[in-house]
Image (cartoon, rainbow, N blue to C red):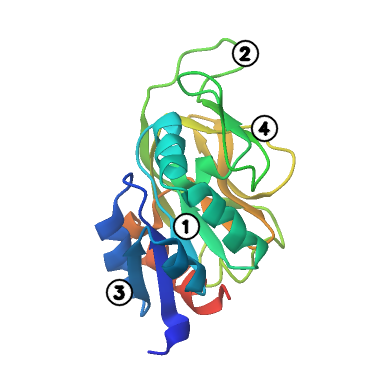
Amino acid sequence: MTANALTGIIDYGVGNLRSVQSAVERVGGIPLITSDPAQLLDCPRLILPGVGAFGHGMAELEARGLSAVVHQAVAAGTPLLGICLGMQMLTTRSFEFGDTPGLGLTAGTVTRLERSDGGERLRLPHVAWKPLRRVSGVLDWFFDGIGDDDRFYFIHSFAVQNAKVGVAALADHDGLAFAAVMTHGNVIGTQFHPEKSGPAGLKLLSNFVSKGR
């Protein structure tokens, strides 16, 4: 492997770091779990994982000075992949347990999965294996090798709904659509966990590690 296979995994105290590390290794990457700004800024690509509440995640990212590092890396053209909570934190804000600003690297706001017509309440958290409904022509390189029947593992109660721009793929919970993949420039977010999504998820990670440069 060359140094270009190095993938920085941002350690801000929140997230399933080891499963992401293992998945990156399985697709031929060289994972580096670190919270050191210099090390992260030297990586040719970065992953922002995350599990839990939006506000807590943003607070931990800020406390470690890593939100500024993320912005600096993205501004320098470094590809960044946010996973689950990591994707949500890329957005402008979340209304999970209040109103909390996000990193503002993708469009949209994060809200609870609820029907706008006042219909039957959805069972939460949404835990399911779901296919993706792609937006044609967006992130073709990232989705290379992914079929219409491939399914991905979701576990969440909040999501980006009714986004106008930046949506690369949609999924649904009992007919309610939400953003499954979002992008802006060199930034990508997945609401699902590719590291827990079997061969299809590993293929996406392989595409990110090998082509996201």
Dot 4: element: loop
Q: Where residue 116 appears, x then y in whole percent?
A: 61, 17
Disc 3 versus disc 1: nearer the observer: 3
Tell me the distance, in whole angstroms, between the alpha carbons under discs 4 and 1.
24 Å
Give residue 157's position: percent from left, percent from top.
Answer: 42, 29
Q: Secondary structure at mark 1?
A: loop
Residue ID for mark 2: 117
Which of disc 3 and disc 4 is earlier in sequence?
A: 3
Mark 3 crowdedness (10 Å alpha carbons): few <14, some 14-19, many ≥20: some
Give the CA distance from mark 2 to mark 3: 44 Å
Residue of label 3: 26
Marks 4 and 2, the one that precedes in the sequence: 2
Mark 3–mark 1 distance (CA, rounded to whole Å): 23 Å
The spot of residue 84 in percent (x, y) is 44, 45
Q: What label does residue 137 carry, if any? A: none
| Residue pointed to by mark 4 | 162
Q: Which residue is mark 1?
A: 149
